[in-house]
Image (spheres, rainbow, N blue to C red):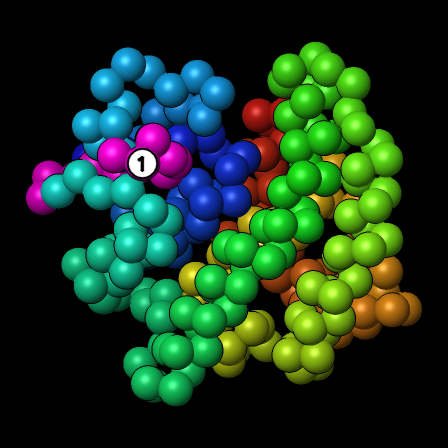
């Protein structure tokens, strides 16, 4: 059986979980956190980052690499488009979500959820407000410009780009930040469509259980 090593609330770990669930692959999660890596973790993740992944063929790390491996080994229920141009778009939006979107949503989640609930420390709310005011708008402006009134990031089916972006939007929402639908109407509508899919509904319920 496949095993995902990493904290399920991590957007990178959740991206891999989405890929596995979309492909109906049976797997286990070993809930390893970056702040409490077990001894020897570098043997399965040389950079000591999550997620790491193991199955009967190999052990690898990095969420994007894992997703591409899953797509090639299990081509049923594809999570990448077949069209070359659309596939490139998916990879770009996945990268943008893993970097730029994480860069604004991640600190909000860290301050309000990780520090407060897990580390039992007071969040730096001034940092959160500065991000919301000065950094987040540029990222959300770009996303809103790229989206249409229907479908997902690239086409009418879910891809790894949606798994990555959706994971970050989930964490921002968990941390109490909600998209301003008047300022970013297409992004707000996209999130609503995304969270209404069964894949995301299931994960929202699972995450709620983890945080309760």
* Residue plotted at (78% across, 48% down): 131
Q: Quadrant of residue 28?
A: top left
Query: In the image, residue 126 lies at what x, y percent?
Result: 86, 35
Q: Find out whether residue 50 is within the magenta segment.
A: yes
Quarter of the image where the N terminus is located = top left
* Residue plotted at (58% across, 34% down): 207
Query: In the image, residue 200 lies at what x, y percent?
Result: 56, 51
* Residue plotted at (82% across, 55% down): 134
How many marks are shown on the rendered structure?
A: 1
Q: Quadrant of residue 130?
A: top right
Numbered range of the magenta stretch: 46-57
Question: How many other residues sit within 10 Å of disc 1, few (<14), some (14-19) or many (≥20)?
Answer: few
Residue bearing the label numbered 1: 47
Q: Is residue 24 visible?
A: no
Q: Is residue 182 left or right of residue 64?
A: right
Q: Residue furthest right?
A: 182
């Amino acid at each position: 059986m496949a095993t995902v090593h990493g904290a399920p609330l991590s957007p990178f770990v959740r991206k891999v979980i989405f890929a596995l669930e979309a492909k109906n692959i049976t797997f286990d999660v070993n809930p390893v956190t970056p702040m409490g890596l077990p001894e020897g973790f570098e043997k399965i993740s040389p950079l000591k980052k999550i997620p790491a992944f193991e199955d009967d063929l190999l052990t690898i790390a990095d969420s994007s690499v894992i997703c591409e491996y899953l797509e090639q080994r299990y081509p049923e229920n594809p999570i990448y488009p077949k069209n070359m141009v659309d596939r490139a778009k998916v990879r770009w939006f996945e990268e943008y979500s893993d970097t730029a979107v994480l860069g604004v949503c991640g600190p909000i989640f860290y301050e309000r959820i990780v520090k407060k609930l897990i580390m039992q420390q007071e969040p730096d709310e001034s940092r959160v407000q500065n991000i919301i005011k000065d950094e987040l708008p540029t990222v959300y402006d770009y996303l809103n410009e790229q989206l249409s009134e229907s479908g997902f990031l690239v086409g009418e089916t879910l891809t790894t780009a949606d798994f990555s972006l959706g994971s970050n939007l989930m964490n921002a929402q968990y941390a109490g930040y909600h998209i301003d639908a008047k300022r970013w109407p297409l992004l707000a509508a996209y999130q609503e469509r995304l969270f209404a899919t069964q894949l995301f509904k299931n994960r929202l319920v699972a995450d709620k259980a983890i945080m309760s």
